[in-house]
Amino acid sequence: MRSYFRQRTMQSAISLFGLVVLVFFLARLTGNPTDLLLPVDTPLAVREEFAARHGFDQPMLVQFGRYLLDLLQFDFGESLRDGRPALQMVLQAFPTTLLLSFWAMLISLVIAIVTGSIAAWRPGGVFDRIASLISLAGASIPNFWIAIVGVLVFSVWLRALPTSGTGTPWHWIMPVTVLFVRPCGVLTQVVRSSMIDALASPYVKTARARGVRSRVVIFGHALRNAMLPVVTVAGDQAAGMVNGAVIAETVFGFPGIGKLMIDSIMFRDFAVIQAAVMVTAVAIFVLNILIDLAYALLDPRVRHG
Amino acid sequence: MTGHLLEVENLSVRFHSRGKIVDAVRSVSWHLDRGETLAILGESGSGKSVSASAVMGLIDTPPGEILSGSIRFDGRGILGLSAKDQRELNGRRIAMIFQDTLAALNPVHTLGHQISESMTAHGIPAERARTRAIELLARVGIPEPERRFNEYPHQFSGGQRQRVMIAAAIAMEPDVLIADEPTSALDVTVQAGILKLLKELQAENGMGILMITHDLGVVAEIADRVVVMSQGEVVEQGPLAEVLGAPRHAYTRRLLEAVPGRHGYPAARDLSSEALIEIRGLSKYYGVSAGVLKTPTGREIKALDDVSLTLNKGEVLGVVGESGSGKTTLVNTLLGLVDPTKGEVLYRGKSMLGPGNREIARNVQVVFQDPTASLNPRMKVGRIIAEPWAIHRGVLPRAEWPRRVAELLEQVGLRPEHADRYPHQFSGGQRQRIAIARALALKPEVIICDEAVSALDVSIQAQVIQLLKDLRRDHGLSYLFIAHDLPVVRDFADRTIVMQGGRIVESGITAEIFEHPRHPYTQKLLASRPVEERMRGHITEPAE
């Protein structure tokens, strides 16, 4: 297990370095921050002074070298907008997004496991057909549409839910909904199909031939095996939540990392973009390791392989 | 009251699937008494397992439907019991073991848990179940039972898994043990051990055994009485000696006729000494590496170790070995799928290895074990057979393809119009014929048969072997015939090579190998198949 961690950390380090390079140059492809941040009529001398202060006058490779050196000391630089350390801004926004994703994922999994298992019990039955239709719809509807329609219906027409902010639990309902619908639809379908396979498997037949109770057959034997593909897909969906968070947080003015990223991109706030991308990437690497661990926990064949 | 322990009477079961109705069994009757072994013998699709599933309450409605009949166990009707009553019976009084042990055991639970479960499900406290499970593991011959109690199915060999299945089945000392093809997936030496174990257990606790099998050898070895099934009906039943010695039904006679190893050895033929394939000192080692950097540990697995052999023109060379003997690596090396560590493979004196051997490759074709897997399900048969011509351009002009496909189909005993169908529309035996037609497309000199008949029912097996013989006669083909099954080789091969652990341990004229095996492993292989001998005993000396 320890060699596994060493291996994973080394792989992650290589990928992270690639990401560092990519983010740095891609961000600079989008335009010159000097033009964007300073008023149009700023005198040339002021412009040059601004560029020199932030190092924008240096050759690209020198900028890159300095950026790397700073990174090694966990210094992502300062925000161009308000001068706060970029990392600090990102870490402040991060827990909000984490919590948002956590609730969305938890709700997705609970609904998917319950619905998918019941649907698998009688494939082609009434419940299965309704569940399949709804989950397919959930997996296909774009989340920005849900966000906009949600605001229109619940905030504008019904005036039941707030449109932005994080003050009360009511503020969380719509953002969480926007995030969970899609993973929930996808996961329900995965649970359903892997549960159908598991229930038809020879080991379920063996358990029945032993006189094991139906409840134990379903939860102890079938569901445990059916969870393996679900864990993999849930991991993918969780990583994909960053995309959803960008939309949900932007639409609902939710102060998470997604909104921070969008704002920083609009502003060419390089240091914050870089810090946000790096923190997200590290989070996704950690998530992947957790998923591998969960998988090894569920499947002894992985543990011994 | 008839007094039989388990009795099935006039059972008819129908399955509905996708609008089709399949009558799986029609009016099947049989009975089993304490301490006896009843074999239900049938080929695939004969419905031999259906009545056993009905006994265990494993036929779900839908798709199944029990049309008529009754099942009595210990004097009590048990067909259509409530789920609760069925659970009382299953595992406690009637237990069942299955063929594919890797699939039939739950991969995520320890074997100890699964054995204990067959006791805890019937109210035995967990601690006592554990103690008993360890005793049972020891009883069925698993070394170090305490430690292995906590291991998972994939950590056991196939034979050991079947022993564990048996341990779980006998945990509650059932009156009846139903064994559904328990040895079909196992090597012959392992198979013999399992059958011996079942007989010992039966002698100890007097349970009745219902053995469901397609293997006449297993029947001859273990059964007291036999039920022969074909197409959902019982065609014949009676004491073993009667059914095997004086079969009354035509189907049983055909089945017996088809058993390999009954017709003596292939007649000694004048073999040419023109060598087609020569293998010299072929070795394939796999290094064992460990850690992040995959540093070699210096340990090596010798999949093939200094193997030399010659295949002459017109000859059938049998290669026999159990799993792990190196058969598969040998085939893969010949096909260029694996690069050997050492040694060379010559075809008519030219190396077959490395690039630029396409012309040579044309002359050596292969037929694999599983025709379902080796034929592309999305291609029509005509295209499958024509594919070699698409790969080796210039062999046959495109306009000629349909005519030649029709010819090939006729050669392998199919009809020209079959070219327009898909593989799934054929039976297993027919699919293997299609695979043979494809192998013939390039007019090869050598066909490698890699377990080519192992997955087929005996009667089909015999037909495919006959086809291979006819093709050899008509086209002067040579075969490298690889099998784990001795009797088939005995019927067909001129010379036989026995492999173990990557090495050739014995080789010679087939009759010599079978009559006077010199190497202990060959002797063990032959000894673990006394069943054919016994069966021949039954057949040549009809019941008194």
Image (cartoon, rainbow, N blue to C red):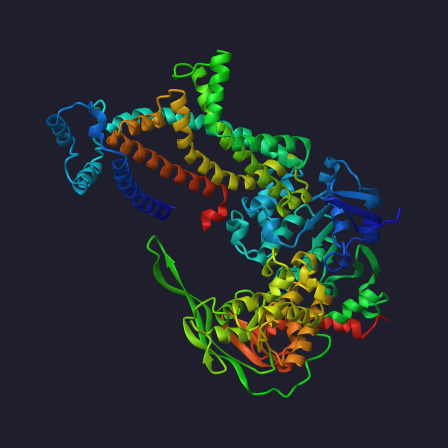
**Residue for point 39% across, 40% down:** A289
Q: Above or below — where is B144 with respect to A201?
A: below
Q: Please give left or right for residue A114 compared with residue B65 in the image.
A: left
Q: Quadrant of residue A26?
A: top left
Q: Please give left or right for residue B201 compared with residue B357 in the image.
A: right
Q: Above or below — where is B288 with respect to B509?
A: above
Q: Above or below — where is A270 with respect to B200?
A: above
The residue at the far right in this view is: B1
**Residue for point 60% across, 46% down:** B115
Question: Which of the two residues, B208 or B375, is positioned nearer the viewer here?
Answer: B375
Q: Quadrant of residue B206?
A: bottom right
Q: Please give left or right for residue B354 compared with residue B464 in the image.
A: left
Res. B190 in view: no
Residue B442 percent location from the top left of the image? 58, 73
Q: Please give left or right for residue B281 compared with residue B11 in the image.
A: left
Residue B362 percent location from the top left of the image? 53, 73
**Residue for point 47% across, 66% down:** B337
Q: Above or below — where is A201 with respect to B181?
A: above
**Residue for point 66% across, 49% down:** B169
Residue B163 percent location from the top left of the image? 61, 55
Residue B448 percent location from the top left of the image? 57, 72
The residue at the far top in this view is: A159
Give the total number of marks visible in the rendering: 0
Res. A30 in view: yes
